[in-house]
Amino acid sequence: MPPVNHNRLRNELSDDLLRRLRLPPLPRLVRRRRLRHFHPLGHVCHKANYGDRPYADFRPTFDEAARNLNADAWADLFKLAGARYVVFVTKHHDGYCLWPTQVENPWRPGWHTKRDFVGELATAVRARGMRFGLYYSGGLDWTARPEPIANLGDMFACVPTERQYADYAAAQLRELIARYKPSVLWNDIAWPSKADVPQLFADYYAAVPDGVLNDRWFAEDAFFTSLRDPAARKSFNDMMKARIAASDGPQEGPVPPHCDFRTVEYGLGAIPKDKKWESCRGLGLAFGYNREERPSDYMTGPELIAMHRDVTGKGGNLLINVGPMADATIPNEQRAPLIALGKTLR
C-alpha cells in the first residue's frame, strides 16, 4: 500500500466523513457498568476457562445445543411481548451463518448451519401476523479479517474491503433476499464496497417493494483500507477523541445517501429529525446472552415499559435484542420484562 499522507487524511476527515462518524460521549454510568463486565481483554477469560481452544472448535457444541430451538415458542413470546416485527441475526461478526447458505465462505468452508434457523423463524413469525426482518453483519467478518478491535479506528480498519469478500457478502445478501423476502434489511457496521450499494438496494426493492433499509451502509472502502496504516489509524482515533471531548451532547450526523430509517443504539446519539428512526438495545448491558450478567443488570418490566413509552412518544420504534442461552431457551430475566411490556400494549 502506498504511504499515507496524514495531513490530507486529517483534512478529509474534518469534513463530511467526520460528521458522519460523530459520536456522543458515553454516559458515565453506562461506561462504568460496561467495562466491569466486558473487559477488552476477553482472551484472559477465554484462557482461564478454555485454554488454547480456538473459536471454531466450539461449533459442534453450538450445533448440538441449538437443536433444541423451538421457533414457535420464540414467536409466541415475541407476539406476547407485543412485537410488530422481528429481526433475526443471520450472520454476526464471527461469520457463522444460521442458514444453509449456498455461498461458500472462502476462508472457512462450510461455516454455516445445516438447519435453516432463519427459515423456521420466518415461518413462525409470519404465521402470527408479525413482519420478519434480517440482520447481517456486512462490515465485520472475522473469518476474513480476524484482527483484534480495541477502538473505532481498529473497527473500520477491520472492514474487509478486498473484492473477494465484497463479492461474498453481496452474494449472501442476495441469497437472503431471494430466499426469505425480509421486510427489514438491517445491515451492521458498514459495507465493504461503495460501488456495490446502489445495485444491492435496487435488487432488494425489486424483490420486496415495501421493504425498508436501515442506515448502516457506510461504504467508504478507500477510507477503511487507509486505516490499516498504524499512523493513519492513530491520527483518526486522536481526532475522534478530541471531537468527542469537545462535544456538547449527542449530535445527529447527516442523513446517509439513502436509508428508510435511522438507528440509535443504547440511547447513544441524538434523535433523528425528519426521519423515521429506531432505538435498539439489549435487555442487559449488551447484545446477546452473557452468563456473567447478574439479575440486576437486566431491565425490569417497569423500566422496559418506560423506555417503550419514551421512544414511541418521540416517534421512534424500539428494537429489543433477545439473547437466548446456549440451549436455545430464553432466560426468565429476559422473558419477564417482555411479557410485562406486552400486557401494557394489549
Image: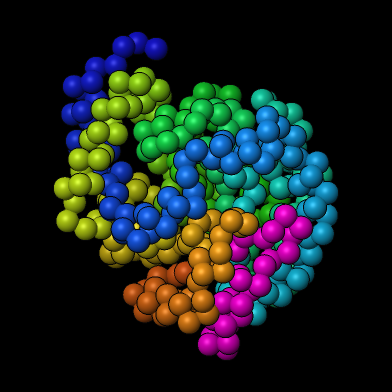
Q: Which residue is drawn at 43% across and 64% down?
A: 279
> Picture quarter containing residue 236?
top left
97 shown above or below 296? above
Viewer-side residue, 212 vs 8: 8
Q: In the visual, does 184 lie left or right of 181?
A: left
Q: How many marks?
A: 0
Residue 301 horizontal/vertical position (percent): 52, 80
Split into 4 quadrants, where in the image is the C terminus?
Answer: bottom right
Outermost residue toward the front? 48
Viewer-side residue, 60 vs 105: 60
In the rendered image, residue 42 lying in the magenta stretch gets the answer: no
> Picture quarter containing residue 157?
top left
Residue 304 horizontal/vertical position (percent): 48, 76
Tell me where the magenta segment starts and ends, as one range.
320-346
Q: In the visual, does 131 lie left or right of 276?
A: right
Q: Residue at x 74, y 29 (%)?
A: 109
232 shown above or below 249? above
The type of colouring in the image is rainbow
Q: Residue at x 31, y 44 (%)?
A: 21
Residue 319 in view:
no
Residue 269 horizontal/vertical position (percent): 31, 58
Split into 4 quadrants, where in the image is the N terminus?
Answer: top left
Q: Residue at x 56, y 69 (%)?
A: 295
Residue 322 in view:
yes
In the rendered image, residue 337 lying in the magenta stretch gets the answer: yes
Viewer-side residue, 163 vs 324: 324
Outermost residue toward the top? 2
Residue 33 horizontal/vertical position (percent): 42, 57
